[in-house]
Image (tube, rainbow, N blue to C red):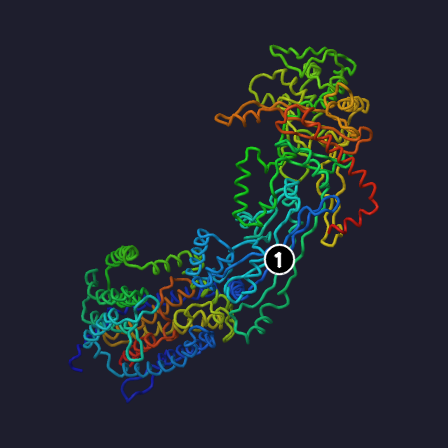
C-alpha cells in the first residue's frame, strides 16, 4: 500500500455535496409529483384509456327509415349490399392478393394503386395494420359467394353486409327526397356527440337531409374483451370490466310518409317530356300539401348515394356540375324567377283594394303604352279592354296604365300578403325567397332617383319581381280557397317500422289573407275565362274534360350573356320562361297547379299543355281512387 | 444517524444499509419481472422471455459475488489499474464494430461463448475510475476553468463517440452526465459553467444536425409532441404512461395490470419495468420504489462525503452517479418527463450486462464505504 499516493485533501468537496443532495432530492420530487399527476389526478383518464385498449366494440348497424309517398309506395328504402374489407397485417400480398384482385375484377392500374396502399399500411405496422381497410363496396353476389365459400384461401379478407340506400323511382322526385352522402370530416369534428363515425352516410338534401335525425335510427353496440387476452382470463375480465352493459340493440330509424303522390309526379314528368328544364308543383288548396313537386332536369339519387362506390359518385357529380342546366338545382323551391303575367291577378287585387282600379273601366290597348320617354310594349293590340278582358287576354297595356297610377309599395304589400318575397317555410331544401320590390328597395339598389317605369314593370310581374314555384302555387291556392295561405307541406307523418304513427303533421296556415270576396270573385271569373273564353290565352291548348282555371305567363329573362359563351346556349338561355298557374276544378277548387318551363317561350303554347295533362291525370286518378277507396287500407299493407 | 456496520475480519465494516437497499430493489425487480414476462407464457412470439426472471436471479447471485470481490479489493488499487482497465475496455468496445450481433438495428452486443454481453455497460465504471483518477491527481486550491476539464471530458468522450456509432444515445448520456457529476464536486469557475452551458447547447445542435440517426430524432420529437404521431414512436411512451396512470392510487394488483398482460407495453422487461410495477402497485407502491432509489442516491453522496481521500470520494460520486442518472432517465421516460432513450432501470430491468455493471458500481461504493 505504500505505493498508493495518499492525498486526503477532500475539504474542497465538502461544500459541493449539499448541491448534489439538493439536485437528487429535487429530481425525485419532480418524479413523485409527476407520478401523483399520472396516477392520482389523471388516474381516471388513463384508466379509461387502458379499458379502451382491451375492450373491443362491434357496432351493430341500424336500418334507416323508409320514405313512402301519400299512398304508401316506397320512395326510398334500404337494399342489402356487401363490402369487402382487408386486414393489411393478415393478408399475404404475394399469394392471396392476386387472387383477390382477380375475384374483384379490379383493373391493373387500380390494382397496383391498392396494393401500394395496403403494403404501405402493413409495413408501417401499428394498430392501423390490424384494422379492416375498405377494398370494394357493393360487390356482386357472385363475388360474395366466391369469397365466402373459399374463405380459407382468402386469409385477411372480410365480407361485411352494409345497407345501401335505394330509390326505386330513380330520378323522379329526387330533389324533394334527397340522397345520401358520406359524413365529412367537418361534421365528425364539430359534432362529436352526434354519433357519426367515419364512413357513415347521412342524408344530403331534401327530406333525407331535413329529417335525418328521425330517419337514421340509433346504432347498437356489443363490447368484448380483446382477443389478445388469454382464454383462461376472459371470463374474469368480462365480469370485471364489462359488467352488464356490453350489449345494446340498435334502434331502427323512423319511417316517413310524404304528401307526394308518385302517380301524379310521374304524370308531371311525362307532361314535361320535350322540355329541357322546368318545374311542376301541384298543391292541395285545402291543406297546402304538395301532391307533386317536380324539378327538371333531375339526377339519379341511386348513382350519387354511394352504393356503387366513391368513384361512381365522383363521376356522377362531375357530370352534374358540368351540365349548364344544373340538374341538382331544385327549381321548385331553390330558384326564383320573374313570374310574368301570372302575377297580374295580384296586381289587379292591389288596384281594386286601393280603389284605383274600376273593374268596368276600359283602357284602349294599341299595342303598347307610352310612359315618360319610354314605350312599354304589349303582347298584341287588344283594343278596348276592361279588367276581365285584360286578365283573359293578358293585356299588358291595361296593367301599365294601373302601374302608372298605383304606388309600387301598394303592389308589394298585396304580394307580401300572399307570401311572396318571404320563405314559405317548407323546411326542405334551401329556399329562394324571391323579391317584392318596394320603393325603398329600388332606392337602395339604384343610387339614382326612383323611376315610375319600375312600377309599370312590377305590375306585369317583370322588372325586379321574382317568385319561386312553390310560392306561386300556394298563392294561387290561396286565391282558389278564398284567402287561406297555407304553409307548403311535404311530410305527412312519421311512423315506426311497424307502421304506428308517431307524429302526424296537420296542415298549417301561414296567414289568412284579408281580401274582399267581391274582388276575389272578379279575379276568379277572369282566371276561368283564360281557359274557357274564346279569346283566352290558354284556350287554344284546352283539353276536353279538363276542368281548369288559371293564368298564363311569358316572363322575359335578362339578356346579358357571359362573354365567350356558346351561341346555341346563349340563344336558349335568352328565351322567355313559359308559365301557367291555376287551379282545378273551377268550382270549389281542390288543387292548385303551377308549371314553369324554363326558357320554354310563350306560356300559353308551352306551359298550358303540361298543366292540362297533369290535371287530366289528377282527375283520372281521383276517379279511379274513389272507385276503390274502400280497399285502400289493404293496398297500403301490401306495399310494405 | 448511527451507521449500522458489521465487523468484518476486525478491519473494514460492511455497509448494511447499502446492501439491504440493493438487495431489496433487486428482489422487487425479480418479482416484477415475473409479472412483466408472464404475458409471454404460452404466447406465440418471444415465449423465451417467459422465464427470464430465473435467469435474472442467477445474474443477481453472480453480480453480488462480483460486487463482493470488488468490495474486498481496496479501491485505491483501482487508481493505479484505471488506465489499463480503461484502455482494455475501450478495445473491447471497439471490438463491437467487428464482431457485433445486430439487435434491432443497433450493434451493441458481443458474443462470448453462449453469453452475449454489452461492452458499453461495463465501460461505465471504467470511465468513473479514470475520471476519479484525474480528479485525485488534480489537487489544487483555486477554481478550475474550462480547459482544466478537457482531459476528464475526453475520458468520457471517447467511449461516447464509440457508442454513438452503434448507435446508443442512452449510454452516451450516462457517460457524459456521470463525468459531469463527478466534476461538479470540484470547484469550477462560474464563467466556465456559463461557457460549458453555451458549448453544450452548440454541441447539442451539431449533434442533432449531423450526429443523430432519424429514429433517435424521432424519439425526441415524439417526446416534445406525443400526440402528433400516436401510431409510431410516441406510442410506446404513451402506453407506458397509460399503464402508470391505470395503476391509480393502490394499483391493479399483482399480475393484474392489463396494459402489461395485453402486450401494450413495449420491452416491459428491459425498458419499461417501472410501468409494469406502477400499474400493479399504484401510486403508493411506486412511491416506495422511488424512495428506495432516492435513498440509494443520497447514501452514495454520504459515502462520498465520508471517504478518506479524493479518489474515494470521486469514485463514490461517479458510481452513485451512474445509478442515479440511469434511474432518473428510465423512470423519467416511463412517466413521460424525458424522451425515450433506452436506458435500463438499475437492479430492476432484466439484463445480465446491466445488472452486473450496476452491482460492480455498488461494489466500488461498498469498497469506499468500508474504508472511510
Q: Which residue is mark 1?
A: A61
A141 sits left or right of B350 in the view:
right
Within the image, what quadrant is residue A13 found in?
bottom left
* Residue B222 locus on image (x, y percent): 40, 58
Do we see residue B303 in this rendering?
Answer: yes
B135 sits left or right of A214 in the view:
left
Q: Is residue B141 above or below residue A303?
A: below
Please tell me which residue lies in front, A198 or A392.
A392
A334 sits left or right of B339 in the view:
right
Q: Is residue B177 above or below residue A369?
A: below
The N terminus of chain A sits in image quarter: bottom left
Q: Is residue A470 above or below residue B294?
A: above
Instruction: Say which residue appears at 38% left-offset and 57% top-offset.
Output: B221
* Residue A67 locus on image (x, y percent): 69, 47
For mark 1, name the chain: A
> Hey, which residue is sitting farthest bottom in the picture?
B9
Do we see residue A22 in this rendering?
Answer: no
Instruction: Say which residue appears at 54% left-offset and 61% top-offset.
Output: A158
The 10 Å Cα crowd at callout 1, few under 14, some 14 to 19, many 20 or more, is some
Instruction: Say which residue appears at 36% left-offset and 73% top-offset.
Output: B346
B355 sits left or right of B189 in the view:
right
Within the image, what quadrant is residue B273 found in?
bottom left
Please tell me which residue lies in front, A122 or A34.
A122
Tally of numbered tags: 1
* SS for dot 1: loop
Amino acid at each position: 500500500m505504500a505505493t498508493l499516493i495518499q492525498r486526503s485533501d477532500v475539504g474542497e468537496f465538502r461544500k459541493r455535496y449539499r448541491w448534489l443532495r439538493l439536485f437528487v432530492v429535487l429530481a425525485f420530487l419532480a418524479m413523485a409529483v409527476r407520478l401523483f399527476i399520472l396516477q392520482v389526478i389523471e388516474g381516471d383518464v388513463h384508466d379509461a384509456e387502458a379499458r379502451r385498449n382491451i375492450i373491443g366494440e362491434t357496432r351493430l348497424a341500424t336500418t334507416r327509415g323508409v320514405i313512402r309517398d301519400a299512398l304508401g309506395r316506397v320512395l326510398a328504402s334500404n337494399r342489402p349490399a356487401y363490402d369487402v374489407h382487408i386486414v393489411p397485417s393478415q393478408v399475404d400480398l404475394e399469394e392471396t392478393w392476386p387472387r383477390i384482385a382477380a375475384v374483384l375484377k379490379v383493373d391493373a392500374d387500380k390494382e397496383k394503386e391498392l396494393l401500394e396502399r395496403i403494403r404501405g399500411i402493413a409495413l408501417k405496422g401499428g394498430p392501423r395494420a390490424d384494422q379492416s381497410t375498405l377494398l370494394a363496396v357493393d360487390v356482386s353476389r357472385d363475388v360474395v359467394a366466391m369469397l365466402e365459400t373459399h374463405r380459407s384461401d382468402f386469409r385477411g379478407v372480410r365480407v361485411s353486409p352494409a345497407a345501401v340506400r335505394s330509390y326505386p323511382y330513380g330520378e323522379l322526385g329526387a330533389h324533394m327526397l334527397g340522397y345520401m352522402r358520406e359524413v365529412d370530416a367537418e361534421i365528425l369534428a364539430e359534432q362529436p356527440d352526434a354519433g357519426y363515425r367515419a364512413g357513415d352516410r347521412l342524408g344530403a338534401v331534401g327530406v333525407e337531409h331535413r329529417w335525418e335525425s328521425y330517419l337514421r335510427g340509433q346504432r347498437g353496440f356489443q363490447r368484448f374483451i380483446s382477443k389478445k387476452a388469454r382464454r383462461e382470463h376472459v371470463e374474469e375480465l368480462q365480469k370485471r370490466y364489462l359488467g352488464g352493459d356490453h350489449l345494446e340493440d340498435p334502434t331502427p330509424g323512423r319511417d316517413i310518409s310524404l304528401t307526394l303522390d308518385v302517380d301524379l309526379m310521374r304524370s308531371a314528368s311525362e307532361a314535361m317530356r320535350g322540355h329541357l328544364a322546368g318545374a311542376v308543383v301541384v298543391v292541395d288548396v285545402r291543406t297546402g300539401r304538395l301532391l307533386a313537386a317536380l324539378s327538371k332536369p333531375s339526377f339519379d339519387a341511386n348513382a350519387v348515394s354511394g352504393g356503387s362506390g366513391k368513384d361512381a359518385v365522383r363521376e356522377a357529380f362531375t357530370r352534374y356540375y358540368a351540365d349548364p342546366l344544373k340538374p341538382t338545382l331544385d327549381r321548385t323551391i331553390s330558384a326564383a324567377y320573374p313570374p310574368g303575367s301570372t302575377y297580374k291577378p295580384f296586381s289587379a287585387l292591389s288596384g281594386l283594394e286601393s280603389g284605383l282600379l274600376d273593374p268596368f273601366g276600359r283602357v284602349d290597348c294599341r299595342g303598347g303604352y307610352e310612359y315618360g320617354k319610354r314605350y312599354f310594349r304589349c303582347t298584341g293590340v287588344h283594343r278596348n279592354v276592361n279588367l276581365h278582358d285584360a286578365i283573359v287576354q293578358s293585356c299588358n297595356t291595361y296593367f301599365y296604365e294601373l302601374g302608372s297610377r298605383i304606388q309600387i309599395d301598394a303592389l308589394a304589400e298585396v304580394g307580401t300578403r300572399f307570401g311572396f318575397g318571404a320563405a314559405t317555410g317548407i323546411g326542405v331544401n334551401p329556399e329562394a325567397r324571391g323579391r317584392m320590390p318596394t320603393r325603398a328597395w329600388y332606392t337602395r339598389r339604384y343610387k339614382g332617383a326612383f323611376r315610375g317605369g319600375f312600377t309599370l314593370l312590377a305590375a306585369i310581374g317583370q322588372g325586379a319581381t321574382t317568385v319561386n314555384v312553390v310560392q306561386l302555387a300556394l298563392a294561387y291556392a290561396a286565391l282558389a280557397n278564398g284567402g287561406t295561405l297555407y304553409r307548403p307541406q311535404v311530410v305527412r307523418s312519421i311512423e315506426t317500422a311497424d307502421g304506428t304513427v308517431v307524429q302526424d303533421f296537420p296542415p298549417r296556415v301561414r296567414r289568412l289573407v284579408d281580401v274582399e270576396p267581391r274582388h276575389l270573385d272578379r279575379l276568379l271569373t277572369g282566371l276561368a275565362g283564360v281557359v274557357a273564353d274564346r279569346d283566352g290565352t290558354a284556350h287554344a291548348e284546352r283539353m276536353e274534360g279538363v276542368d281548369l282555371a288559371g293564368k298564363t305567363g311569358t316572363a322575359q329573362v335578362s339578356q346579358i350573356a357571359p362573354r365567350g359563351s356558346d351561341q346555341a346556349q346563349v340563344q336558349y338561355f335568352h328565351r322567355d320562361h313559359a308559365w301557367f298557374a291555376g287551379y282545378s276544378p273551377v268550382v270549389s277548387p281542390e288543387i292548385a297547379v303551377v308549371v314553369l318551363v324554363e326558357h320554354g317561350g310563350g306560356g300559353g303554347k308551352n306551359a298550358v299543355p303540361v298543366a292540362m295533362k297533369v290535371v287530366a291525370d289528377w282527375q283520372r286518378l281521383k276517379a279511379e281512387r274513389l272507385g276503390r277507396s274502400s280497399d285502400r287500407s289493404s293496398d297500403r299493407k301490401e306495399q310494405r | 444517524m448511527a451507521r449500522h456496520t458489521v465487523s468484518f475480519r476486525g478491519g473494514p465494516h460492511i455497509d448494511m444499509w447499502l446492501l439491504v437497499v440493493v438487495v431489496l430493489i433487486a428482489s422487487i425487480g425479480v418479482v416484477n419481472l415475473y409479472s412483466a414476462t408472464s404475458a409471454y407464457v404460452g404466447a406465440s412470439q418471444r415465449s423465451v422471455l417467459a422465464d427470464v426472471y430465473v435467469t435474472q436471479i442467477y445474474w443477481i447471485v453472480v453480480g453480488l459475488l462480483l460486487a463482493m470481490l470488488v468490495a474486498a479489493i481496496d479501491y485505491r488499487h483501482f487508481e493505479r489499474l484505471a488506465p489499463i482497465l480503461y484502455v482494455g475496455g475501450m478495445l473491447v468496445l471497439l471490438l463491437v464494430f467487428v464482431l457485433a450481433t445486430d439487435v434491432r438495428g443497433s450493434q451493441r452486443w458481443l458474443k462470448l461463448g453462449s453469453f452475449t454481453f454489452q461492452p458499453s455497460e461495463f465501460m461505465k465504471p471504467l470511465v468513473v475510475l479514470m475520471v476519479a483518477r484525474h480528479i485525485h491527481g488534480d489537487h489544487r486550491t483555486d477554481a478550475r476553468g474550462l480547459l482544466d476539464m478537457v482531459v476528464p471530458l475526453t475520458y468520457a468522450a471517447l467511449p461516447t463517440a464509440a457508442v454513438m456509432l452503434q448507435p446508443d444515445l442512452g449510454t452516451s448520456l450516462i457517460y457524459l452526465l456521470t463525468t459531469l457529476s463527478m466534476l461538479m464536486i470540484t470547484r469550477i469557475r462560474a464563467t466556465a459553467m456559463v461557457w460549458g452551458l453555451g458549448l453544450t447547447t452548440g454541441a447539442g445542435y451539431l449533434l442533432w444536425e449531423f450526429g443523430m440517426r432519424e429514429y433517435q430524432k424521432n424519439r425526441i420529437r415524439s417526446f416534445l409532441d406525443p400526440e402528433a404521431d400516436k401510431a409510431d414512436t410516441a406510442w410506446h411512451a404513451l402506453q407506458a404512461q397509460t399503464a402508470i396512470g391505470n395503476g391509480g392510487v393502490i394499483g391493479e394488483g399483482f399480475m393484474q395490470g392489463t396494459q402489461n398482460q395485453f402486450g401494450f407495453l413495449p420491452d416491459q422487461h428491459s425498458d419499461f419495468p417501472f410501468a409494469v410495477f406502477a400499474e400493479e402497485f399504484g401510486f403508493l407502491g411506486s412511491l416506495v420504489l422511488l424512495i428506495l432509489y432516492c435513498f440509494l442516491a443520497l447514501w452514495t453522496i454520504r459515502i462520498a462525503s465520508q471517504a478518506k481521500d479524493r479518489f474515494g470520494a470521486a469514485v463514490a460520486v461517479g458510481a452513485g452517479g451512474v445509478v442515479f442518472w440511469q434511474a432518473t432517465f428510465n423512470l423519467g421516460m416511463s412517466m413521460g418527463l424525458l424522451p425515450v432513450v433506452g436506458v435500463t432501470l438499475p437492479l430492476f430491468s432484466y439484463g445480465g450486462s446491466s445488472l452486473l455493471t450496476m452491482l460492480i458500481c455498488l461494489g466500488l461504493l461498498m469498497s469506499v464505504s468500508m474504508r472511510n
